[in-house]
Amino acid sequence: MQTRAIHNEISDLLTKYPAVALIGPRSSGKTTLARLFSDRHFDLERQGEDLKVDLQWEEITESRDPVILDEAQEYPNVFSRLRGAIDADRKRYGRFLLPCSAVSPHLIKRVPQSLAGRLAVVELTPLLLEEVGAEKVNDLWLYGGYPEGGILQNGGYPGWQRNYLSLMAQRDLPKWGLPASRQVTQKLFSLLAADNGREWNASETGKRLGVSYHTANSYLLYLEGAFLIRRLQPFYTGTGKRLSKRSKVYWRDSGLLHSLLKTGGYDELVGHFAAGASWEGFVIEQILGALNTAGVSFDAFHLRADNKRTVNLILQFGRELWAVNTKLTTSPSPADLNLLDKAADLVNADRRILITQHREFIEGKGKVVCDLGGFLEYMKKVFDG
């Protein structure tokens, strides 16, 4: 069984909170991970399982082992019932583990604010580089991190990814509230693949879908809530500098993106016109996933003043800013670092990092040039003291 980096974080939270919600995309391994903590499992997507929970509720609330309520968002009354059970014995921790595959606008309304202080939320991503090993970085980029998508064993990609997206468009997203036909959703997937790493333009996307920009924005919210798309907000300095105020959109899993782009093997991928943007999104997702797994508090943004002054990822740790750029090359040049410096100077970034495929780690005067694995190790050293 694949060891997940977030395992220890969940163990710790179960000693501090009555309930822990384990959120993340479908098929990322949430149920498998949850069942390492308990055998008391209820799958609320299965027909009749809600009745089973109703009939056994007293037994559930008295259990000394964590009770797993899988896909809890499918059971409208569960969160209010959880509140009552928790408040009846506030000193008992680690009682409920709630794997959830969606936090869409429609579903989030079911989670009452009254669970604040009673419920911890932790996100499980598809597999991260630290979980599969730095030597598999190219495979992870090509196939993505879903355990069944090819990274753990050959043969899944790209058929598994295509089936996954088809089921999302036909079954899951409509069930979670997306008011779009399967054909419109699949077209939106393709448009977002072509626009991966670009600034979000709701008006243009709406025109191509035949809907208003308001509707296009609402559709994107559902894809974000299903953990398919990440929207990276623009960094705002408040100093009057002319910076873009548009967010950027990325496919969170590179394997899903590549299946939409119809790329085959690794050689075909690196020769694809969208390879640079794909690498950029992949690196960003790995960095943010590693920070979340480590429990580091941060905010993430992008920055663009013009085409020559951009920062792919701004990381804000309190008052400290890190500027991170990516370039799909094994031969970075001083000019690449100079471009990063010019953009990072706009926000007085404390550290400037250029991530490439060059394996040598080079550091000096707050600047780092390295590969992805080297940067993840660098972050560990910084935050582990």
Image (cartoon, grey):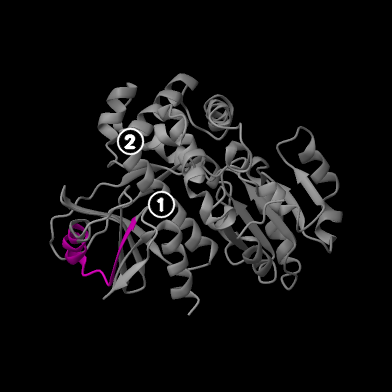
- Disc 2 designates what residue? 274
- Which of these two is toward me, 319 or 88? 319
Residue occupying the point 68% across, 66% down: 11
Report helix, strand or loop for mark 2: loop
- Disc 1 designates what residue? 283
Asked if residue 351 lies in the magenta stretch, the reply is: yes
| Pointer 2 local density, CA inside 10 Å: few below 14, some 14–19, many at least 20 | some
Asked if residue 215 lies in the magenta stretch, the reply is: no
Earlier-in-chain disc, 1 versus 2: 2
- Which of these two is toward me, 176 or 264? 264
* Residue 227, horizontal then vertical, whole percent: 50, 44
Residue 238 visible (yes or no):
no
Amino acid, disc 2 = Ala
* Residue 134, horizontal then vertical, whole percent: 51, 56
* Residue 150, horizontal then vertical, whole percent: 59, 37
Residue 189 vs 225, above or below: the answer is above
Residue occupying the point 68% across, 59% down: 83
Tell me where residue 318 sits by quadrant. bottom left
* Residue 66, horizontal then vertical, whole percent: 77, 59
User: What residue span does the magenta drawing correspond to?
Assistant: 338-355
Amino acid, disc 1 = Val
- Which of these two is toward me, 165 or 150? 150
Residue 248 vs 361, above or below: the answer is above
Q: Are marks 1 and 2 in contact (CB under 8 Å)?
A: no
| 84 relative to 274 in the view: left or right | right
Residue 93 vs 105, above or below: the answer is below
Residue occupying the point 52% across, 39% down: 143
| Pointer 1 local density, CA inside 10 Å: few below 14, some 14–19, many at least 20 | many
